[in-house]
Image (spheres, rainbow, N blue to C red):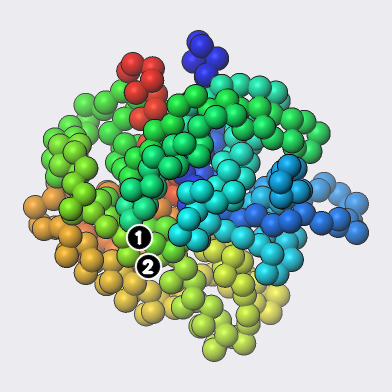
Amino acid sequence: MNNNGVVTIGLDVGYGLTKAVADNGKSVCFESRVAPAEFIRFQADIGAPVQTNGLTLHDTEEGTLWVGELASTQGRPGAVRSPRDRDRVNDPITTCLADAAFAMLLPGIDTTRARVVTGLPVAFYRDALDLTQHLRGTHRMLLEGRSLTVEVEDVLVVPQPFGALLSLILDERGRMKTSTLDLVEGKVGVLDIGSYTTDMILVEGLQYIEARSGSIEVGVSTAIAMIRKVLQDDYRVSYEPHELEQAMRRGWLIVDGKKLPLNGLASERLDPIARSIEAEARTLWNISTLTGIVLAGGGSLALKPWLEPRFRQAIYTPNAAMANAVGFLRYGLRQWNGQ
């Protein structure tokens, strides 16, 4: 937090996960899921309570809501929502997820001012002004045991994958890294493989080239659908998509009481996903002329063995799932703190 008492936040509200980082050193990552909260009739009081990645918000219009993993595990089937609809910019779920991120990033704080950098998928970037207006202003949150008011004074919206590149070329204070001068001056492609979509942007001399940027409906969910089918066909086991997404992050799931490593499961079915991403990238870019291809998003890790042989200039961000949020924060520090 800077000397003016204004916190800078990088916020990445994805279809599958919401990621956020702040200049107070805090970071959060939780499922982009919201569900009406209900009374839980029984909770076992044995040993230490299991920590659930989520929280409860008391919304004045929609009532009490579970956000994050709480919504996935406790929400009634059919009542759990995620930001998959076209008008997600103006959907109240965007506010709920942003508020939950603010609350997790700012423990023990009653009121503060904030500046936010966030992103939109390439296909929806024309909605940037609407998102700015939607997030700017006063956010009042009533939480379990406390309240929080965040006055969002300023909002910057960038194409979502741009955050991954920014996370590589800017340091923790928002200053340009001299070691990444080739990426700054060169022509760079960025592949951001999320839950449901893969966003691709081309950046030349740090200029976003819109005509060579786009999105395709391929992501982690495609891989999950294939793994789910293998489990049903070969093991007669049924898992919900959100459970498999959690398992992909862990690297294993339970079948007949035993841990089954996901490494290698459905491998031959994941190769076509990598092929379709490569085909779209080659349609947009002259790949052989690129200085580097930055890979980010949780899907880039799941598909790494199939993507690396196709993109020889591949550069993986240190924390692929959080890369956009980290880049957004560093960009905000550079813009507002004069680095």
In terms of secondary structure, where does tag 1 sit? Answer: strand
Q: In this view, does 118 lie above or below 79?
A: above
Relative to 239, say whether 286 is above or below. Answer: above
Q: What element carries label 2?
A: loop
- Amino acid, disc 2: Val
Q: Which residue is drawn at 26% across and 26% down?
A: 176
Q: In the image, 84: left or right of 198?
A: right
Q: Is residue 336 visible?
A: yes
Q: Which amino acid does label 1 sit on?
A: Thr
185 w.r.t. 298: above or below? above
Residue 263: image location, x then y, percent? 47, 69
136, 333: nearer the viewer: 136
Residue located beneath label 2 in the image = 218
Report, in whole angstroms, how far the alpha carbon at label 2 lies from the one at label 1. Answer: 6 Å
Residue contact at pointers 2 and 1, CB within 8 angstroms = yes
* Residue under numbered circle 1: 198
Q: Horizontally, is 154 left or right of 138 in the view?
A: left
> Which of the 4 image quadrants contains residue 104?
top right
Q: Rate crowding at label 2 as few (under 14), some (14 to 19) or many (20 or more) other CA atoms within 10 Å.
A: many
* Image quadrant where residue 317 sits: top left
Where residue 63 appears, x then y in whole percent? 76, 48
Tag of residue 208: none
**What residue lies at 35% left-to-right and 30% top-to-bottom?**
331
